[in-house]
Image: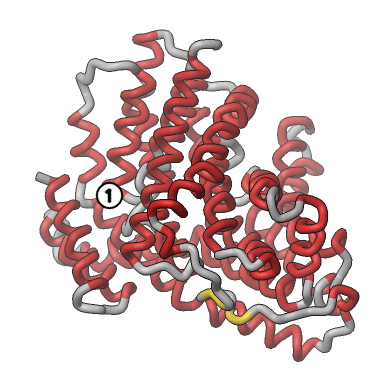
Amino acid sequence: MKLLIVAIAVCLLIFLIVKVKLNTFISLIVTAFLTGLVLGIPVDKLPTVITSGMGDQLGDLAVVFGMGSMIGKLVSDSGGGYRIAHTLIAKFGRKRIQLAVIIASFIVGLALFFEVGLVVLLPIIFVIANELGLPLLTLAIPMAATLNVMHGFIPPHPAPTAIAQIMHADVGKVILFGIIVAIPTVIVSGPIFNHFLHKFYPKVYRIQKSIPGLGNIKKFKLEETPSFASSALTAMMPVILISISTILKYLLPNNETSKVIQFIGNADVAMLLSLLFALYTMGVSQKKKMVEIGHTLESAITQIAVMLFIIAGGGAFKQVLVNGGVAHYISTLFTNINMSPILAAWLVTAILRVSLGSSTVAALTSAGLVTPLIAQTGVDPVLMVLAVGAGSIFADHVNDAGFWMVKEYFGLSLKETFLSWTTLTSVISVTGLLSVYALSLFI
């Protein structure tokens, strides 16, 4: 019954957005309230559930998302994105530009959340696409696919790190085998999926001169732009700070120095330091006036305001589903299931992901349900961690913030986002599962 309620709620949400043409944020809030009532959440508690869901979602994203947007705008407005694009084009050429995008996204995706990586990379991807005269989606698909794979499979991202702890899997092995699983998954879901999507649904591959959230991209003379080293370092600074902090966490003893390094590597702090660095490299050193730099920062915030509300609405909807007992209900369905532990881990997580929206919530909930299978079957816990990670990516749709970010940033309609992004995340998930099965033959 609860799964039917979720299905009806999703249909209602789509109806309000597509047919009624109601604002997306309002549609999410209306759907969240109605779904909460049907799921039996007390009327006096429902507003608190809604606001806590909004707050939790924005609490995780607002600072990082906002500063990431500012860094991206500074890199873009100063010509740093143009310089990076020009250099990548010169090094890799048009035929291998998707490879360049995948490599850049792979590096960024090692440390940054999917949403933040998207904000940091998108201005650069957009400039490259325009420089080569390519549709945005040609490069956005491999970029987003790579970021999503890294977010689902590789520590220090929250879900795989937490799952490894729950299942008592060695984090180093999870990283190593996660990268092994990620490589074929990225190849299939990036360039190969791109080819078939372009063949069967070409209308989404269109040249875009501007995209929501970024505004119009300026034209630059190469000699007036920051150097490639300065531009790349600025764009990669959050990754560098967080990566160094993560590595040193396992190498240094737990002393005061280690605490300082961990503080610097905290996502919020790393983004703040990176923003200050960007203000200098992309602003002051380019001899820009503070008033001009201020306009750039204000523009960045203005452009993401609507998206922040949509993300908050998605958080409210997700929280209603969690508090309404959907996760607990699904868990009871798989209490006495009899199938391959790897498939069971993937399937439970995939159902939770489709129902709840949040990949992290789905992964953590599933980990608690399937961990007993490790002792019962003797399966390697690393494989179980990766199977859960693959399931947590499955069929991203309207109850997840990432879906709306992709829709708005890539300039897609709701139908186009379903046919391209929801399909892509399903391909990532299934390919990841098959890759885990292949890996199980050797470990």
Residue drawn 61% across the image and 31% down it: 179
Residue 431 in view of the camera: yes
Residue sitting farthest toward the bottom:
291
Residue 233, x across and y down, in percent: 81, 58
Q: Looking at the image, is 441 positioned above or below residue 235?
A: above
Q: Quadrant of residue 390?
A: top left
Quadrant where the image shows the N terminus: top left
Q: Looking at the image, is 435 positioned above or below residue 107?
A: above
Residue 308, x across and y down, in percent: 46, 71
How many marks the image carries: the answer is 1
Instruction: Name the side, left or right, on which 431 lies relative to 102.
Output: left
Residue behind mark 1: 322
Q: Camera-side residue: 9 or 34?
A: 9
Residue 234, x across and y down, in percent: 78, 62
Instruction: Name the side, left or right, on which 35 lies relative to 292.
Output: left
Residue drawn 50% across the image and 68% down it: 206
Q: Camera-side residue: 332 or 204?
A: 204
Instruction: Name the side, left or right, on which 365 lies relative to 45.
Output: right
Residue 376, x across and y down, in percent: 34, 10
Q: Residues within 10 Å of mark 1 (few under 14, many from 20)?
A: some
- Element on which disc 1 rests: helix
Residue sitting farthest toward the front:
199
Quadrant where the image shows the C terminus: top right
Three-letter residue code for mark 1 = Val
Q: Looking at the image, is 237 positioned above or below residue 158?
A: below
Residue drawn 74% across the image and 61% down it: 235
Residue 237 in view of the camera: no
Residue drawn 86% across the image and 79% down it: 284
Q: How is the image coloured?
A: secondary structure
